[in-house]
Structure formats: C-alpha cells, structure tokens
Image (tube, helix red, strand yellow):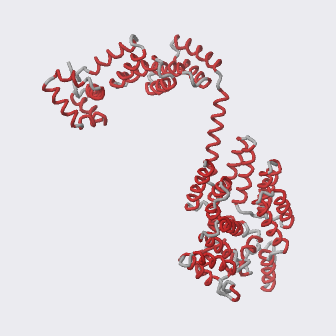
Amino acid sequence: MANSAKATEFKEKGNKALQAGNLEEAIQHYTEAIKLDPNNHVFYSNRSAANAKYGCYDEALADAKKTVELKPDWVKGYSRLGAAHAFLSNADEAEKAYRKGLEIDPNNEQLKNELDALDKKFSGPGKSAPLNSPFNSPDLIPRLAANPVTAGYLQDPSYMRILHELKTDSKAVAKYLQDPRVMKTLEVALGITLTKAEEPPPSESKPSTKKEEKTEEVKEEAMDVSVSQSQKDALKEKELGNAAYKQKDLDTAIEHYTKGYELDPTNVALLTNRAAAYFEKDEYQKCIEDCEMAVEEGRKHNAAFKIIARALERIGNTYLKLNKLEEAIKYYERSLTESRSDALVKKVNQLKKDIKEKEKLAYINPEIAEQEKLKGNELFKGGKFPEAMKHYTEAIKRNPSDAKLYSNRAACYQKLAEVRLALKDCDECIKLDPNFVKGYTRKGACHFAMKEFSKAIDAYNKALEIDKDNKEAKDGLQSCYINSTTPSSDPEEVKRRAMADPEVQDILRDPAMRLILEQMTENPGAIQDHLKNPEIARKIQKLMEVGVLQMR
C-alpha cells in the first residue's frame, strides 16, 4: 500500500509537470511511479503522452504498447498507441490501433476524430504524407537526428512543439520564418540551402563565378543533409540499446550503445545513454568518463545545450551517489549554466542546506562550549559585554541545545540595549528548557524595556508558576503594575499609542468589552468580578498598558 500511495504521488507530480510543459521532469516522475508500481497501465499511458510531446516517439510507442498489454480493454491505451504510430509515420499501424479502440467503444468521439485526422495527414499515395508538406516526410526525424546541427534541436521541447504543429499544418511555417531552427529544418527536409553563406573577404579569396558558387552550394548541402548508412545504423543501435535498458539488460544495452557510437561519433546521446547504463550497474567511474566525453565531443559537434546539461547532471548524480556532495553541487551548477531546470535548482538548494547542517553537526563539541561560556562569564563580570557576547555565540555554535547559553547571551544584548535580539534569545532559551526560570525573568525584563507591560506580566507570572518565591519575578511584576497604571500626562500620546496598536483597536471594537468598560465606569468595584476571567483580565491589562484605562 505504501508503494502504491508513493507511486500515485509521483504520478500527480508528473501530471503537474506535464501541464506546465516541463516534459523531461514529467517523464522522470512517471518513471519513478512505474518503478514503484510496474503494473499500473495509467503510468505508462501518461509517460507515453509525455514522451510523444518531448519528441521521443519510439519511447512513446513502447509505453503505449505496454499500456495496451496491461489493460487490453482500456480505450485510452489504443489512442496512445495510434498517436505514437502516427508520429512515426506508421499510418497502417495507427489506423489498426484506432479501429481496435473503436471496437471496444464504437461511439468514442476522440478515436473518431483521431482517425479522421490520420486520414488527412496521410492522404498521399499509399497512405503517405502529402508531398506538398516537407514536414510530413516519413524519414524527417532520422534525417534531423543524423544532421550535426539539427540533432540538437530534437532535445528542445519548444522545437518539438513547433515541429508537431508544422506536421499537422504546413501553413503554420509563416509564423516561424524568423526562427533559424525552422529554416535549417526546411533545408534538411527539402535538400536545399536556404541561407546564403557569408562570402570571404576579397583579400582572402578571389570572387567566384556563378557556376563555382553553385558547386560550393551543392557540396555544402551534401555535407549537411546526407545521411550515411552508418548514421542510420547508429540510430538503430541506439533503439536496441534503449529497449535492452528498459528490460534492465544493461550489458546488452552497453554493447548496442558502444556499437552505435563507433558508427556515429557525432551522436553523443549514445554516450550519455551508455553512462546511464553504467550508473545502474554501479560502475560510477565509467559513467563519469562517458559523461565527460559526451561534454567534450558534444561541444565539438554543436550538440544541444540540453544534452550537455544532461551529461553534467549525470556526473552530479554519480557524485551524489558516492556521497561527495560538494562535487555533486559543482556539476549540477555547471549543468544549470547549460540549461535551467527548476527541479535541479531545488535539488541544489536542498543539498546546500544538507551540507550546512552536516557542517553544523560536525562542529558541535560540548566541552569546548563550556570553555567558551566560562570565558564569556569572566568578560561579562568585567563589563566587557561585546567580547563576552562573542564567546557566548561561539559556545552556542558548539552546543546549540544548551538553554543557559542563550540566556547568557540575552543578558549581553540587554546590556548593549539590543532588546529585540535579547528577546529572541530568551524565546530560544524557553523553547529548549520550558522550566528554566531565568529565561522567563529575562523575557519579562525585555518586554518591560519595550513598555509591553502585559507581555512582561505574562512572562513574570510564568516564572512564578515554576518558582513561586522568585524575587526577580515578584519585583518585575510590581514594576509592571506601577508603570502600567500611571496616568499619562499627555492625552494625545495616549490616543496615538491606542490608534497605533491593532490589538487595542480590536478590544475597543469588541461589544462585550465595551459593555464591561461601561459597567466599570458606573461601578468601579465591578472590575474584581471581571478580573476572574483570564482573557478579560488580559485585555484590561492591555488597555491599562497604553493608558486608555486608568486605575487608582
């Protein structure tokens, strides 16, 4: 049950990330959900959708097939399966999937609409994409992946969304003519060069004839868009490696990734995939070496920033696994300079907090704390309060659970007229030891200094609950009552203080309190009965404190 609940939690996180457009993060969350509950068809369905949006169509297809395998009577699975086949230009398989779903639910409008869209998308001869849309070419994705420039685009979710829009509506290209990625995609799709190369300066090269320019243009086009057989074979090896990785056959996956990289050294994604397999095998040094090679080779071949970032993040994950937190943070931050990820930012921030906490715990030494306290005591007796405070502060760092140390430092702050800092230390002292009388008497003195007499009275009363004969608390109470009931000589000052205190305003607006105050005006002796109620007594004391209510 615990695993199922945790898996559902990851699924919800994935859904939120998917809705926010954080596709890679969504895929990670769905993957975690699947690890915890590998028989839940919904998790595979959701990851299929995320993979499809991210442009990982083979992965989307694999997840859709698993969805249908786990839940053959679930219509949504066939919708996912049909969509994945459609993205891969497998028109016949997509149609079979949609029709299978309609056999289960003949009135399903979504499947009907998807089937109509499929017919429009593949309306060319033999169910091919119409020739007037270069973005519907069945081999466009492999060609883009084989091109050193456009291969990096495929890792960018924003580019994949644009490409999907162009596949469904070729007229949309007018919106993206200023995007150099789209222009380069057109070059690959059409097999032409649309951007004019910059001509060399006259001093470096003779002007070319038109015939020579055309020859150079054809050579450039052949270099950019031609897909060698080895590159195609490399992509096949990558797919085989991915399939083996998903089955946890890591050695086979590594063999395929290695062969693929030998066939196409420009495809550094093969290195990051192999690194992932090494990571799963706990062969961390090999994982790091592959990721470092991916960064180096990726820069040479203009790989997408996301690929470089992924390699650096994977190095960080490896160091984290080895409990080398500083090294992990270093590589995570390098990853963020390549491509920002909110999830990774949170991870780095949490790691930094963990390191600080670890350092804080390692610094604790009660023996040294006691030595620092004694040094502080001597300096305090000699009236050297700033110097004493430094030693008390060091003592607190060495033993942050000792309540007396906060009380001692509060005394220094009081002497230095830093009343609010003193009050903060008193609160921490009381939190650590609720029965430490000195914490309450010092707190009462702080509130008294701030003319918050009702709060001071509360603190002194608390001290007397612990020690009924405590002289400091009794004297403090008497001072509070004398000062809080002394009439103010300036009515305007009384009014100003009352108007500036929201608590006073709330008391005066309370109908019950207004009635009590009227009774006290008519019969001063009535106050004795009302003071038996602790809440009313507190409110009356507050009004006396600011001078609104005066008693003799």
User: Can residue 173 be seen here?
Assistant: no
The quarter in which the C terminus is drawn is top left
Q: How many marks?
A: 0
When asked about the image quadrant of residue 402, the answer is top right
| Nearer to me, 459 or 254 | 254
User: Can residue 25 be seen here?
Assistant: yes
Q: Is residue 309 left or right of residue 222?
A: left
Going by the picture, which residue comes out furthest to the bottom?
125
> Does 336 appear above or below 267?
above
Going by the picture, which residue comes out furthest to the left?
522
Image location of residue 186, percent across then percent down = 68, 78
| Nearer to me, 353 or 128 | 128
> Does 501 appear above or below 344?
above
> Does 425 appear above or below 12?
above
| Nearer to me, 250 or 260 | 250
Image location of residue 135, percent across then percent down = 67, 79
> Does 168 appear above or below 36?
below
Q: Is residue 464 left or right of residue 191?
A: left
Image location of residue 461, percent across then percent down = 37, 19
Image location of residue 349, percent across then percent down = 61, 44
Q: Is residue 225 left or right of residue 537?
A: right
